[in-house]
């Protein structure tokens, strides 16, 4: 951050890919893997947990389709693949509430889509 930047507007901003491609597309899509329901759950659960300045938004394709349902949390820029509501609970509790990480669900530098390296 530059010194002149204003303070962060959100403590955490989560982008959940909700892109949907036709069935059978070679890259698949996060919506076809259930991301819309996961986004809705995450939004309401974050509110229920009282996570104040946390924003959960839908995103178009984040270009890590093969590893979806994909989401990324800023300002850290940490990516996750979540498949269940329990995964979302773990991310909200460990990452957003406690400032830790859920390593088993993280996408790393090793998660590069075919042809993108
Ligand atoms: S469809 Fe979700 S990252 Fe591309």
Image (tube, helix red, strand yellow):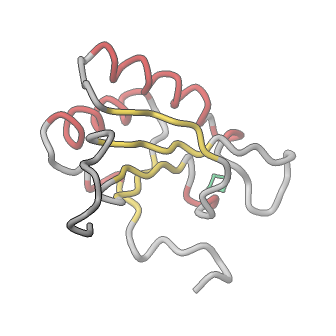
- Within the image, what quadrant is residue 53 found in? top left
* Of residues 59 and 70, the one drawn nearer to the viewer in this rendering: 59
- Quarter of the rendering occupied by the C terminus: bottom right
- 66 sits to left or right of 83: right
Expressed as whole percent of the image width and height from the top left, the position of residue 19 reads 70, 45
Instruction: Name the quadrant where ligand 1 sits.
Output: bottom right
Expressed as whole percent of the image width and height from the top left, the position of residue 89 reads 31, 29
* Of residues 113 and 2, the one drawn nearer to the viewer in this rendering: 2
Q: Establish if 70 lies above or below 57.
A: below
- 43 sits to left or right of 106: right
Expressed as whole percent of the image width and height from the top left, the position of residue 116 reads 63, 81
At 60% from the left edge and 58% from the top edge, which residue is drawn?
62
At 23% from the left edge and 43% from the top edge, which residue is drawn?
95
Most extreme residue toward the bottom, as rendered? 117
Most extreme residue toward the front, as rendered? 4
Q: Establish if 93 lies above or below 62.
A: above
- Within the image, what quadrant is residue 97 found in? top left
Expressed as whole percent of the image width and height from the top left, the position of residue 77 reads 36, 60
* Of residues 6 and 46, the one drawn nearer to the viewer in this rendering: 6
Most extreme residue toward the top, as rendered? 48
At 52% from the left edge and 36% from the top edge, which residue is drawn?
57
């Amino acid at each position: 951050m530059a010194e002149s930047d204003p303070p962060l507007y959100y403590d955490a901003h989560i982008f959940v890919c909700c892109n949907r491609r036709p069935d059978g597309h070679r890259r698949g899509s996060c919506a076809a893997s259930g991301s819309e329901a996961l986004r809705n759950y995450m939004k309401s659960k974050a509110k229920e947990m009282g996570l104040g300045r946390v924003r959960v938004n839908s995103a178009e394709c984040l270009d890590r389709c093969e590893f979806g349902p994909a989401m990324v949390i800023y300002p850290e820029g940490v990516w996750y693949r979540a498949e269940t509501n329990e995964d979302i609970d773990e991310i909200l509790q460990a990452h957003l509430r406690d400032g830790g990480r859920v390593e088993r669900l993280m996408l790393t530098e090793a998660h590069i889509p075919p042809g993108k390296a």
